[in-house]
Image (tube, grey):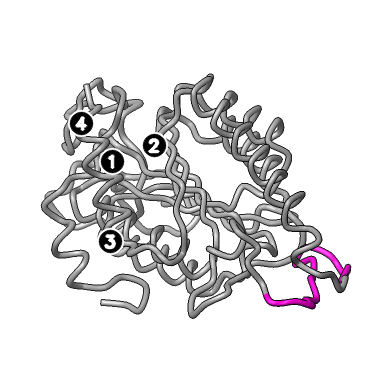
């Protein structure tokens, strides 16, 4: 299949559908195409005209430019549109063990995209650090998954975070109710993050958040002395962990409490995930909980 999605994991998860917590376009809760045309139909691609095609679907402007007949192909909107939003800020490159937060995030995203497209729904991918450098709109075509997978494999976390700016932008640009899945370590001002969540919810998007952390980020259980490097800047300091542990843990607790208050306020689907957790179990929990609250 590919190196981001374990085929055995994908096979086991395929029996648990990715569900929406709220009505998607068409007010249907399933995984079916809309039977309607018009606003519920999305242009997919052109193909050459063959005898028997409906001439009403000939694009005459293309004919005027090329002197050839081309037919417009459409695909109906699916009831669920998965929009994966990846945080590519530098802090996502951290990993105290064999896997970084970024590696873990890519695995979650690729598997969710595979599941969505496999069940006939659409998946898209958005990512950014200082700027939004990836914007692949959702599609349900099977070949679309490979485009998403390739983009994920080519991306790397760099520089300082620009996540909150991108979330506000996406809240306005995603054209209809969607399932927006944010995968990030959320190492930013909690007030700014919560403001983004409110914006997305105001736009009627179903929002799920995976907060990825490394075990050492929670405890700072390190052997002194340590050199700490800012992954989103050029600052490096040498410090005794035991001298700063108490203040560090207090700051982590305040940050977590602020985010949890935002989760309750915005009513989002929130999951704290450590990179030492089995990602299959994380996804099983995510999928089954969504089935339990669907309706």
* Label located before the other in sequence (2 or 3): 2
Q: Residue at x 70, y 44 (%)?
A: 250
- Judged by depth in the image, the label closer to the viewer, 2 or 3, is 3
State yes or no: discs 3 and 1 in contact (Cβ < 8 Å): no
How many other residues sit within 10 Å of disc 3, few (<14), some (14-19) or many (≥20)?
some
- Residue 294, x across and y down, in percent: 23, 27
Q: Which residue range is magenta in the image?
A: 223-236
Residue 92 horizontal side relative to residue 85, left or right: right
SS type, badge 2: strand
Quarter residue 115 falls in: bottom left
Residue 55 lies, with reference to residue 258, above or below; the image says below
SS type, badge 3: helix
- The CA span between labels 2 and 4 is 16 Å
Q: Is residue 91 visible?
A: yes
* Label located before the other in sequence (4 or 1): 1
Residue 208 lies, with reference to residue 68, above or below; the image says above
Given residues 160 and 148, the one toward you in this image is 160
Q: Residue at x 63, y 67 (%)?
A: 221
- The CA span between labels 3 and 1 is 44 Å
Residue 87 horizontal side relative to residue 131, left or right: left
How many other residues sit within 10 Å of disc 2, few (<14), some (14-19) or many (≥20)?
many
Please tell me the numbered disc located at residue 280.
3
SS type, badge 1: helix
Label 1 sits on residue: 57
Q: Residue at x 62, y 47 (%)?
A: 186
SS type, badge 4: helix
Label 2 sits on residue: 179
Label 4 sits on residue: 292
In reply to whether residue 249 is colored magenta, the answer given is no
- The CA span between labels 4 and 1 is 43 Å
């Amino acid at each position: 299949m590919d190196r981001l999605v374990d085929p055995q994991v994908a096979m086991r998860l395929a029996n648990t559908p990715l569900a929406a917590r709220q009505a998607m376009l068409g007010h249907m809760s399933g995984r079916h195409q809309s039977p309607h045309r018009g606003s519920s139909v999305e242009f997919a691609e052109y193909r050459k005209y063959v005898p028997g095609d409906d001439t009403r679907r000939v694009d005459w402007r293309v004919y005027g430019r090329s002197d050839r007949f081309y037919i417009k192909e459409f695909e109906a909107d699916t009831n669920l549109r998965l929009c994966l939003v990846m945080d590519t800020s530098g802090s996502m490159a951290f990993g105290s063990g064999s896997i970084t937060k970024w590696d873990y995030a890519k695995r979650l995203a690729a598997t969710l995209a595979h599941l969505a497209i496999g069940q006939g729904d659409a998946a898209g991918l958005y990512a950014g650090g200082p700027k939004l450098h990836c914007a692949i709109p959702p599609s349900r075509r099977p070949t679309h998954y490979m485009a998403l997978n390739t983009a994920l494999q080519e991306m790397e976390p760099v520089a300082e975070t620009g996540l909150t700016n991108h979330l506000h932008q996406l809240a306005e640009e995603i054209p209809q109710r969607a399932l927006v899945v944010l995968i990030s370590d959320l190492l930013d001002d909690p007030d700014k993050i919560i403001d983004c969540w409110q914006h997305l919810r105001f736009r009627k998007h179903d929002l799920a958040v995976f907060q990825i952390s490394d075990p050492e980020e929670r405890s700072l259980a390190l052997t002194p002395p340590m050199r700490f490097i800012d992954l989103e800047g050029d600052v490096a300091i040498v410090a005794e962990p035991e001298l700063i542990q108490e203040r560090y843990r207090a700051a982590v607790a305040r940050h977590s409490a602020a985010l949890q208050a935002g989760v309750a306020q915005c009513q989002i689907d929130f999951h704290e995930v450590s990179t030492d957790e089995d990602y299959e179990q994380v996804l099983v929990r995510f999928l089954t909980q969504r089935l339990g609250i669907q309706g």
